Amino acid sequence: MRRLLFTAAAATAAALALSSCGTTEPAADDAKKNARSLTLTDGTGTKVKLDGPAKKVVGTEWNAVESLISLGVDPTGVSDVKGYQTWDTAAPLKNDPKDVGTRGEPSMDTIASLKPDLIVATTDLPAAAVKQMREIAPVLNLRPADAADPIGQMTENLDLLARATGTTDRAAKLKKDFDAKLAEGKKKLAAAGHGGAKYAFADGYVTGNQTSIRPYTDGSLVGAVNKKLGLENDWTVKGDKAYGLGATDVEGLTKLDEDVHFAYIGNDGDKSSNPFTGVLKKDKVWTSLPFVKKDNVHRLPDGIWMFGGTESMSRYVDSVVEALKK
């Protein structure tokens, strides 16, 4: 008992001595820091600890970058800045972030030079690259897509980024507005006589002399949005387990219903992405398709990122409604 009392007394004396020397501030700062710290679980099940809401954030994939901007967080670093500005104009960059390399191979040296509070990556990156990033800063490794629940995965990532950046109120508003946009779009399409209309969305690209077309099945984010709008997906091909994307060629388009509305997105900034207004104009299979002859082909506006967040998908809804009402 005497030992315990002595220890307590000694501790008290030591605390008083430290107080008199003005050395208690670091301890107070640590307590404040710990109070603000948070632990998140990313898309791989990894626990990620942050000292507080992240302010300096690097995004290695455009869907994450779009969500950050939508949440009011200007990213410090972005993979392929020019590519983002070309393909995703629904949530434009408001600052001048450092380009940290390509989405598939970001520069570790460039990321490290930015001294970020947080790096947002996706499971599309090799595990070895993510491991290197974790030596620089905490990393949230997101699942970029899930064909089993595309919209759910999109909003789950949005919520995770919101918790990491202290913007949960903003995330709640984005989700509420998006739900309202879906309901409004469905109502407008039904009023225009397009409720249950057969619809097929794709993108395409030209490599050399070969034209490839990617169908967006119900498992894609765009496909899930189409379903919410009351449209019937006319694709019969199977999509992959993550993005819900299929693969076909011009001949494969002959399997679509003759009354289908065919829609696509290309980009004038990437000429290889526009086969439907390019090489296919002289293709006999393409020009013989019933929906082409009926002028039921709709090019949606550039800059809607088909794998983006609530902003891109809201703009997509508006563009579909506008295209089908014409």
Image (spheres, grey):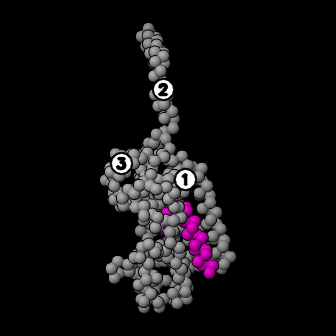
Image quadrant where one finds the N terminus: top left
Residue 251 picture location, percent across and down: 41, 85
> Mark 2 or 3 closer to N-term?
2
Query: What crowding class fits label 1: few (fewer than 14 Cα within 10 Å), some (14-19), or many (20 or more)?
Result: some
Per the image, label 3 sits on a secondary structure element best described as helix
Residue 317 among magenta residues: yes
The answer, for residue 252, to whether it is visible in the render is no
Which residue is found at the position 41% from the left and 76% from the top? 271
Camera-nearest residue between 24 and 131: 24
Camera-nearest residue between 211 and 59: 59
Which residue is found at the position 58% from the left and 74% from the top? 320
Residue 254 among magenta residues: no
The answer, for residue 37, to whether it is visible in the render is yes
State how far apart marks 1 and 3 are (Cα). 23 Å
Q: Which mark is residue 72?
A: 1
Residue that sits furthest to the left in the current view:
128
Residue 266 picture location, percent across and down: 46, 75
Residue picked out by circle 2: 25
Residue 188 picture location, percent across and down: 66, 73
Q: Amino acid at mark 2?
A: Glu
> Mark 1 or 2 closer to N-term?
2
State how far apart marks 2 and 3 are (Cα). 30 Å
From what the image shows, is residue 132 above or below residue 238? above
Camera-nearest residue between 314 and 111: 111
Q: Amino acid at mark 3?
A: Ala
Image quadrant where one finds the C terminus: bottom right
Residue picked out by circle 3: 112
Per the image, label 1 sits on a secondary structure element best described as loop
Q: Amino acid at mark 1?
A: Gly
Query: What crowding class fits label 2: few (fewer than 14 Cα within 10 Å), some (14-19), or many (20 or more)?
Result: few
- For the record, the magenta segment spans 305-326
